Amino acid sequence: MAAFSSLTDRLSNAFKHLKSKGKLSEADIDGTIREIRRALLDADVSLDVVRSFTVRVRERALGAEVSEALNPAQQVVKIVNDELTDILGQGVDRPLNFAKNPPTIIMLAGLQGAGKTTLAGKLGYWLKDSGHTPLLVAADLQRPNAVTQLEVVGERAGVPVYAPEKGVQSAGGDAVSAPGETTGDPVKVARDSIEYARQKLYDTVIIDTAGRLGVDETLMQQARDIRDAVQPNEILFVIDAMIGQDAVRTAQAFDEGVDFTGVVLSKLDGDARGGAALSVASVTGKPILFASNGEGLKDFEVFHPDRMASRILDMGDILTLIEQAQREFDEEQTREAAAKMAEGSFGLDDFLAQLQQVRKLGSMKSLLGMIPGMAQHRKELEQFDEREIDRTEAIIRSMTPEERRDPKIIDGSRRARIAYGSGVTVSAVNALLQRFEQAAKMMKRMSNKAGMGGFPGMGSPGGGKKGKKGKKGKKGGSKSGNPMKREAEEKALRARLSGKLSSGGSAFAKKQGTPQLPEGLQDAFGGELPPNLGGGLSGLLG
């Protein structure tokens, strides 16, 4: 996430000098703690939170769990990860409180500009996608065009909007008013919306309330009046992740004023220091329920403290990536594609179908950002052009059905025609065909070696033969069934017999800082580690 990119880089640098140390001295730990403290303060994390955080990390780092660890550097990173998860609200994360008797009432509160109206549409879209029937309520009658904006957002999300009052308009009509003034009664709008929802059988009501540029008594009184009128099941405090130290003071003011039940972090895709938002859960004791990281309706996710801590420490967020894939991918289509990969008949039509499924997951930048170790490639990631996928699709659609089935028939004249039809250069067509050929070879090798067992949710054609070979491999006693591993064992034995390897050493001793793949993935990749997979701090964690 862009808001935490600076913090991620600083924390990564803080751990670099620990990688080569087999044992950590008190000076090593104190130096690391100093770097962590500076990184958190530079990211605008609350001073009180930073103090308590570094004290706990130092106590644990100087304790037995690090001094007795086989890899002290890994243990220090684990401690920081645990304590960072605590800051973000470990143990207090929970789902939304739904009413036993619908409708469930959700009230949004926060300062003007925090993104409440956009968030109302995202939350409505998320609830609708989860099987609910939400209703958006336009109770912000103060900000110019706030009602109109909510209607536009609701239309995009496919969620109805209850807006009996038009509020303040920027131009035209009788509702034109000076900034700060209100037309209509927002409390009456909120109260009437509940009865309207009952009549129309909406099971969730999301009330978008007014905000101010700063906290004042008028704002709080209006929020309290709406709260008392509708008795919401949830009061979500929407906070801009980029407002710096004001985040903590604003959160405390709203907590005292309306006693909110949960927090939503917005604008996590911004490039400002977002560390202050990390302090909110620790200072208020209220859980962060959701995070918004973009302008799109799908740029919205349930907040998990442990996963966010992993992202900040450049350890990735594979669980969220898997959940998104399971939600968006067509399982039957994926099985068919897997079977074609195994047979070697995977064509460009199939590639296009898979590409379209990947696009459903959202921005490629955000997806790649969930892979461990991507922080060290941030410059390349920021330069990634999302339109490259559109150009790839245009190239494939400019081919004939026969060319898509069998790319080998695409000669020079065909490439020129495809380039002209898709509006790209011939070299772009050549590059796509080369990448496709390499990917097809790699996927076929993976499917053959893993017996399709390495692909989640896919079948295992030919799995019986693999099983028989596996049984034969075990007859050798100590010999591994993995050819790469068996060869390494034999080399180690020869080296030990010739006296080149000390008896205390290990043929499989892990080199410091070298990321390793799980055994199943090692088989799938033929023992080769794909470039940059699992780098950064994830390398420390093995």
Image (cartoon, helix red, strand yellow):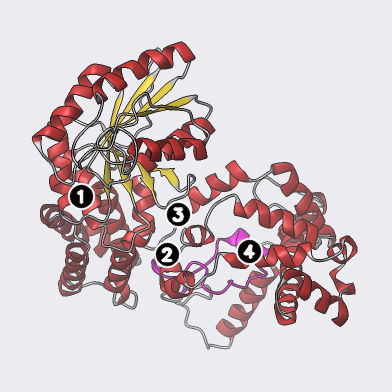
Give whichever of discs 2 and 3 has the lower sequence position.
3
Question: Which picture quadrant has residue 243?
Answer: bottom left
Give whichever of discs 4 and 2 has the lower sequence position.
4
Nearest to the eye among marks 4 and 1: give it. Answer: 4
Nearest to the eye among marks 4 and 2: give it. Answer: 4
Q: Amino acid at mark 2?
A: Ser
Give whichever of discs 4 and 1 has the lower sequence position.
1
Magenta range is 514-540
Q: Are marks 4 and 1 in contact (CB under 8 Å)?
A: no
Q: Position of residue 516 (x, y in %)?
A: 51, 68
Q: Are marks 3 and 1 in contact (CB under 8 Å)?
A: no
Q: Position of residue 539 (x, y in %)?
A: 43, 68
Residue ID for mark 3 = 317
Q: What is the CA distance from the residue labelled 2 to the residue labelled 3?
A: 11 Å
Question: Which mark, by number, is residue 279?
Answer: 1
Residue ID for mark 4 = 389
Q: Which is more toward the observer, 290 or 90? A: 290
Badge 2 marks a residue whose secondary structure is helix
Question: Looking at the image, which residue is at 45% across and 39% down?
Answer: 152
Q: What is the CA distance from the residue labelled 4 to the residue labelled 2?
A: 28 Å
Residue ID for mark 2 = 538
